Image: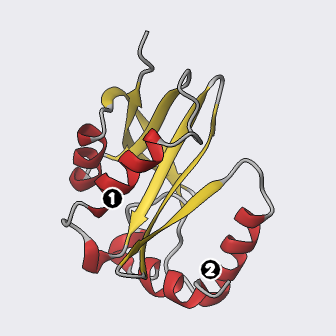
Amino acid sequence: MEDAAKVAQLVGDEEVSKWTSNIPFPYSEQDAITWIGSTASSSSRNPYAVELDGRLVACVSYWPYEPDGIEVGYWVGKAFWGKGICTKALKLLLASDDIPAHMDVFAKVMVQNFGSQRVLEKCGFSFFQNGTVCKAGNEIKAKFYVRRTAT
């Protein structure tokens, strides 16, 4: 909970929020408190804070993807875009014992989010199919990516 104000500052930026399906804009400190509380009480949501020099700058998360996989998502504060932080954090998450080695890993990215698409490609994901994500009740075109398990 001590990070709620910083989370609100980072994802409360319209440029950050617009690329995520679950972060509304505007985003308040109370929204951050609610999100932190809900992830702390859910065994299916697994967020990890990403710090740079002891400061929160991003978050990477994973959760179940039906029928038998894992989905990942992430956000990075705008001041930290283009510095390789998300790529490094996602690679660390994917290499951790938290991600079962036998499961495919999926990610959904809005079509115009080229930075996020590059992050996924650098982390071994491949384009899987076109689709949509829901943002504030609207269907938005998206690309679905997958990182298949080694067979």
Colour mapping used in the image = secondary structure
The correct choice, above or below, for 84 with respect to 129 in the image is below
Q: Residue furthest top?
A: 151
Q: Residues within 10 Å of mark 1 (few under 14, many from 20)?
A: many
Instruction: Name the residue: 53% across, 26% down.
Output: 101
Give the residue pinned by disc 1. Answer: 86
Q: What amino acid does circle 1 point to?
A: Cys
**Residue 66 image point, x, y percent:** 65, 28
| Mark 1, secondary structure of its residue | helix
Looking at the picture, which amino acid does disc 2 mark? Ala
Which residue lies under the disc numbered 2? 32
Task: Give the image quarter of residue 149.
Answer: top left
**Is 77 drawn above or below residue 135 in the view shown?**
below
Identify which residue is drawn at 46% across, 87% down. 9
Identified at 68% across, 73% down, the residue is 36
Residue 37 on image: x %, y %: 75, 73
CB under 8 Å between discs 2 and 1: no
User: In this image, 89 relative to 26: left or right?
Assistant: left
